[in-house]
Amino acid sequence: MAIPPSYSPRRGGLFAAWIAACLLLAWMTGALAAPAVTLVLSEDAPLYAAVARALRAELEADRRGWQLRVRTWREYRSAEEHADLVVPVGLRALQSVLAERDNTPVWALLVPRASFEQLAGKASARGRPVSALYLDQPLSRHMRMLKAALPRARQVGVLLGPESSVRPEALRAAAESSQLKIVSARVDAIEDLVPALTSLRNEIDALLLVPDPLVVGRGGLHALLLHTYQLTLPVAAYSAQLLEAGATLALFATPEQIGAEAGARLREARGGNGVVVPAPEHPQSYQVAVNRNVAVSLELRIPAGETLRLRMERGTEP
Amino acid sequence: MKGWLRSSPIWLLAVLLLPAGRADTLDPLSEAEFFADQPLVLSASRLATPANRAPAAVSVITREMIEATGFRHLVDVLRLVPGFIVGWSGGNTAAATYLGLSEQFPHRMQIMVDGRSVYDPSFGHTVWRGIPVALDEVERIEVVRGPNAAHDGLNAMMGTIHVYTRHSSATLGGMGEVAIGNRDYRETNLRYGGMTDNGSWRLGFLAREDEIHGVDQDRANDVQVNFRGDFSASPWDDVMLEFGLSRGRWQGTNIGNLFYDDQHAQYVNGYANLLWKHVLPEGREWALQFNHTYSQNQEAIPLPAPIDPLSGDYRTSGTALELSYLDRSSAELKKSLSGEFRLNRVRLPMQLDNDYDSDYVFSLSGALEWNPAAEWVVHLGTMLERHSDNGDTSLSPRFVVNWLPSDAHAFRLGIAHGETATSIYVNNVDIRLSVGGVTVDQIFASTEDLEPEKINTVELGYHFSKPEWGLNLDTRIFHNRLYDVVDVDSRRLPNNDRYNVYFNHPTIEVWGLEYQLKWRFARKGWLWLSQAWLSSHSSDDIMYERSVPGYTLSLLASHPLGGLDASVGYYYTEPMRWYAGKYDSKYNRLDARLAKNWKTASGKWQAALVLQSLNGVEDESFSEYLYKHQKYQRRGYVSLKYEFY
């Protein structure tokens, strides 16, 4: 085989090495520039997987590139893997991440606001940036939903346990913005639920459930939903599961919505080679759903969830 | 012993009743509160069809109304229902009948407590006083007015009374109540409820003594205990377990024949009821219910020598197993299917030709609710039922169309056919007087082949609802044609002596217009008004026409009054005459109740004063074999109730 005079095997090898080095450098530069995010799941369960999947899809659509690792809280060791941001998904993961001696910024998902505030205080005091995209919807949005669904409602009842997730003054302020008035009753034990509801019945037009381990715990839910139904009292809830159990309507975000919104917020928060931890906020995304069987049985004419959502967004509550 | 303990249901019960542990401090809320599967509390069978879409007229008496009446007996609450007449024969036997047409043992309505029939198959009636349920435990009473055999079987010929007790989770903690009044009225009512890891339970006790009419032979004592437990085996499986026992000692008679002044009856009733509901996705569920009811009446009847003494003793038992399926997965077409097997056993030594008589009942029912458009609902239902006692197979269909031209207005047009099973007593009666075991007088015999009584109904209903006015109106105009009605005739024996038989004969027509109105005129103020105008015709016997009152009225109103809960009830019927009665019965009665509620650190208190029959008397007169003329005279009681958690 004839070899062109200009070609030298030594020069060819150098050229190839140079190309490879450039490629490696380019790869390394890109890789180093892509923020590293570690998702720490509370469990290897469909709920958390759905959040991770939606978040990953959102980040993969970003041409700037992200390094995304997914671990369960048992697998996660902060010292072993560098990350620009740790995203615990769920309460157990958040507890585990905050227990580590580390200063990597934390942005929690699927954690109710009250629990987040309870846990984040100590970490923040140590100087660790800690934030969250809350799991619960803002109270003002719940009030707008009630107004959109039950335009004649004036007074809304709330049962508050000793460790309720919301403060009465926050409820009152949110209600006022929708021309509603909150009538709250204190519940210290499950046995108080039915008497408290009975005493509220003639004062209120609907009952708003707020996350509360006592009021909406498994033990009290039967009494709560049966008694409100017998009192022909519509119940607004904060989860799809409570809606299915017998609430009249509900406002909530699905795991997919939370994952997608978290991904979109991360993209927005990216600055240069790093990521700025988003401020603690309630989710923008939500669904409104109506338990048609319960509404019909209570002789309530409540429009479909999508119609309610449109009314809420346009501010056209009748 | 150990083996017995382990295999005994008591062991299971003890495990179920273990108190749930309570954490001293509550953990932070987790996402599980938002996403964990929850028990399907308001499953399809728990949701009532709204009145404007229902296939029949329904009166719903709520707990709030029950409290406001001040009544202490379950049966009295039925006075609120349009067209209902409630009376007490001898003070211990209550009779409640819709549209009259009855003796002291009304038999054309099905009565169910938490889905368990309390209809006594012996005489075909309900011993109201013997039902071991305290009024305090009742959540609501739904009265279906008009034939409901398509849903609840043969005995629901004129309608059904569904009594629903409070879910045990609604009565947690303890309650003690004492009530005392004039005319020897005393009552003690105790209840305690608790929680377990997977449910809740309640135990109730009631002891009562009263004299309904205040005459010498009218004293009655009752003692009742009952239990209800509600447990969730999983988010999709609910189990309800109930049992109870009542014991009554009642002066007078419980069999309708008073032979001497000191006659009295001792009555025992016990039951067990198990309901298992399994919820499937999308509004479908099936339920399995098993129950057993036992009752026993002891009533000695010494007759003048040389006639052998008679016995008013009887025992009945009913065992039922029902499997039902409900499908509300489609908004356009809702379906339900139910099959039941029931065994009724009766021992009426004085009155039947055999020691024990049994009736095997098989029934199959189905219902469709079709919503072809938003403003139309079509109901089609039927029940096929077979009784072994008389060998009859009956079909009870119902066809109803609801038209809802607007949110406020709804019209209902329905036709229905219903039948009622003749009681074991009527089918097998054999009463004779004997001397030394030799018959000297045949009083009753069952020589006729009896058909079930039947009814055809046409009705037009109108429902008006205006939530912003707090107004709900339900009216109904109807025509009932009852035929093959069981009547008494006499026949002649070969020796020319006469004896009585039951036979099918009369045809009775009843026209009626009735309405009920519930108006919540203030947040804490409401009014219930019901009226019925009735007219009857029978070419066979004036007795039937007389037994239907021309008019009934019920009014109940409640409103706070200076820190007290105040309510008044007014109940009126035009004179009517119970079958075989020699005098008219009627009531024109005004009741009032004042109650004060207050809380202390340890619990909740209620003191109440109830005054009954303030404006006069209630006249009650049943057959000539009972007291001639009885009056429910002016009376009052005070009660003190304490609830703690």
Image (tube, coloured by chain):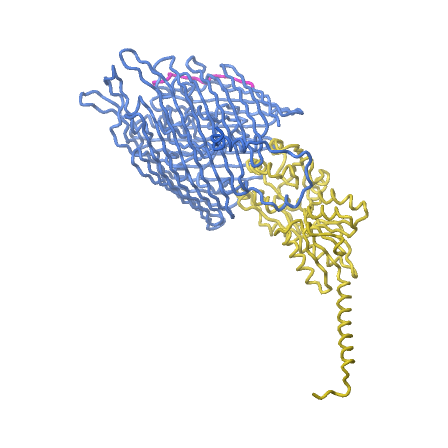
Chain colours: A yellow, B blue
Tally of marks: 0
Q: Left or right: A116 with respect to A203? A: right
Magenta stretch holds residue B293:
no
Q: Is residue B511 visible to us here?
A: no
Give the percent coordinates (x, y) of residue B584. 38, 21
Give the percent coordinates (x, y) of residue B516. 48, 33
Image quadrant in which you'd find residue B520? top right
Magenta stretch holds residue B636:
yes
Give the percent coordinates (x, y) of residue B404. 49, 45
Image quadrant in which you'd find residue B310? top left
Give the percent coordinates (x, y) of residue A187. 65, 33
Q: Quadrant of the C terminus of chain B?
A: top right
Image quadrant in which you'd find residue B476? top left
B403 or B487: nearer the viewer: B487
From the viewer's perspective, is residue B320 above or below residue A243? above
Q: Is residue B480 visible to us here?
A: yes
Q: Left or right: B307 with respect to A24? A: left
Identify the residue at horizontal 66%, vertical 41% (top origin).
A210
B417 or B110: nearer the viewer: B110
B615 or B267: nearer the viewer: B267
Q: Left or right: B570 with respect to A200? A: left
Magenta residues, start to end: B624-638
In this view, the residue farthest toward the left is B494
In this view, the residue farthest toward the top is B305
